Amino acid sequence: MSPARLLSAPLPDLLADLEVQLVESGIADESFFGAVFRLEERLVLVAPSGCPTDEWDVLARGLLGQALGVSLPALPSSVAAVEVVS
C-alpha cells in the first residue's frame, strides 16, 4: 500500500479493498481516538462513538498506516498511539 493510496482513496473504498472490518466502539471516553488490531488474517478498525467524520477519516488512515507499516506524516501530538503486543 502506498502512502498516496492510503491518503487519497475514499475511506469506504479503502476499507473494502483491504477487507478491514469496521466496528463502532461503545467507549465513551473522549480521549479514546480508535484502535486497530489484527484478528487472524483480518484487520479490525474500531471507531470511537460520536467522532466527527472528518476527524475520524484522518485518525482511521493514521491507524491503518501504522498497522500496515506505511510511512505517513505523524498524527497530531494530542493523539498518542500505543502498540500492544500479545
Image (cartoon, rainbow, N blue to C red):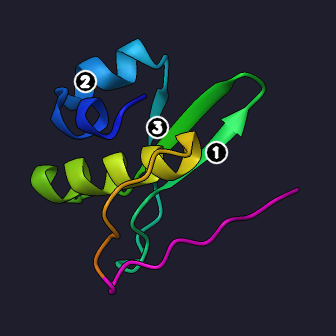
- Left or right of 70, for residue 2: left
For badge 2, the amino acid type reads Pro
Q: Position of residue 17 (x, y in %)?
A: 39, 13
Query: With respect to residue 17, does 78 lie above or below?
Result: below
For badge 1, the amino acid type reads Phe
Q: Which residue position is annotated with label 2?
A: 12
Magenta span of residues = 77-86
* Mark 2 crowd level (few <14, some 14–19, many ≥20, 10 Å Cα): few
- Prevailing secondary structure of the magenta residues: loop
User: Marks 2 and 3: in contact by CB < 8 Å?
Assistant: no
User: Residue 30's image quarter?
Assistant: bottom left
- Left or right of 54, for residue 36: right
* Mark 3 crowd level (few <14, some 14–19, many ≥20, 10 Å Cα): some
Q: Which residue position is annotated with label 3?
A: 23
CA gap, disc 1 to disc 3?
A: 11 Å
First in sequence, mark 3 or 2: give its number.
2
Q: Position of residue 2 (x, y in %)?
A: 36, 32
Kindly identify the residue that appears in the image at 59 percent across and 32 percent down.
Answer: 43
Q: Quadrant of the C terminus?
A: bottom right
Kindly identify the residue that appears in the image at 52 percent across and 52 percent down.
Answer: 66
